[in-house]
Image: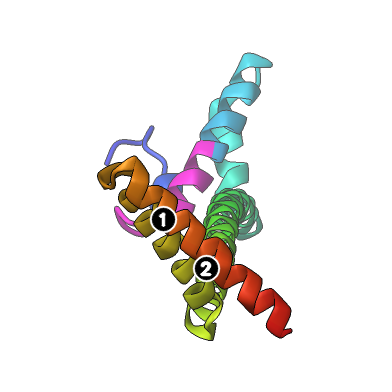
Amino acid sequence: MSKEYNQVYEKLVKNQNDFTGMIAYCIYKHEKRLWILKGEDAEQFVKLKLQPHEIKKYKTQADSLLTIAYQANADEEIERIQQSLAQEMINFAKKTKFEGKFSRLCSWHNSGTSGIVGNFYTGAVVAVLAWIFSSPEAWSNVVDSALATVKQFWHAL
């Protein structure tokens, strides 16, 4: 290796999957750039930054940045899960509300009330059909017979 090559990268980055080390190296390079822009000596900067406490500082800063990034990602995932659960709860409530109404309808139907209403509608349909298909004289006889039956029932009470 040449005299100009420094070992900072190897001290910070252990392998290709060491993202903390790579971020630490980026922080180092940023500081080195600022140092050189101030007109300072780059070799002096490298010697200073190869100290163990400086290497540890870069790793700690990188770890903090990654923690913030992971936390932001986790917060977004939590928000997505909360929205998904809220929608599922709304859908469940709507389904339960509909099932509640449907079960009340089934209960009403099975209770006998529907039998009374059904008999009334059946009678109305039969009466309409009789009126449509009967002659005026036959219909008059049906009406007279029905009125007589209602009067007898009324007097019996």
Dot 2, crowdedness within 10 Å: few (<14), some or many (≥20)?
Answer: few
Quarter location, residue 126: bottom left
Q: Residue at x 55, y 52 (%)?
A: 66
Residue 84 at what x, y percent from top left? 52, 56
The answer to whether residue 106 is above or below residue 70 is below
Residue at which label 2 appears: 117
* Closer to us: 23 or 138: 138
Magenta stretch, overall SS: helix
Q: Which residues are magenta?
A: 11-26
Q: Is residue 102 left or right of residue 54?
A: left
Residue 31 visible in image: yes
Amino acid type at circle 2 is Val
The answer to whether residue 120 is above or below residue 20 is below
Amino acid type at circle 1 is Asn
Query: The N terminus lies in which quarter of the figure?
Result: top left
The answer to whether residue 150 is above or below residue 26 is below
* Residue 141 disc label: 1
Q: Residue at x 50, y 73 (%)?
A: 114
Q: Nearer the viewer, mark 2 or mark 1?
A: 1
Dot 1, crowdedness within 10 Å: few (<14), some or many (≥20)?
Answer: few
* Closer to us: 63 or 146: 146
Residue 12 at what x, y percent from top left? 46, 53
Q: Is residue 3 left or right of residue 77?
A: left
Query: The C terminus lies in which quarter of the figure?
Result: bottom right
Residue 7 visible in image: no
Residue 138 at what x, y percent from top left? 33, 51
* Closer to us: 90 or 120: 120
Q: Secondary structure at mark 2?
A: helix
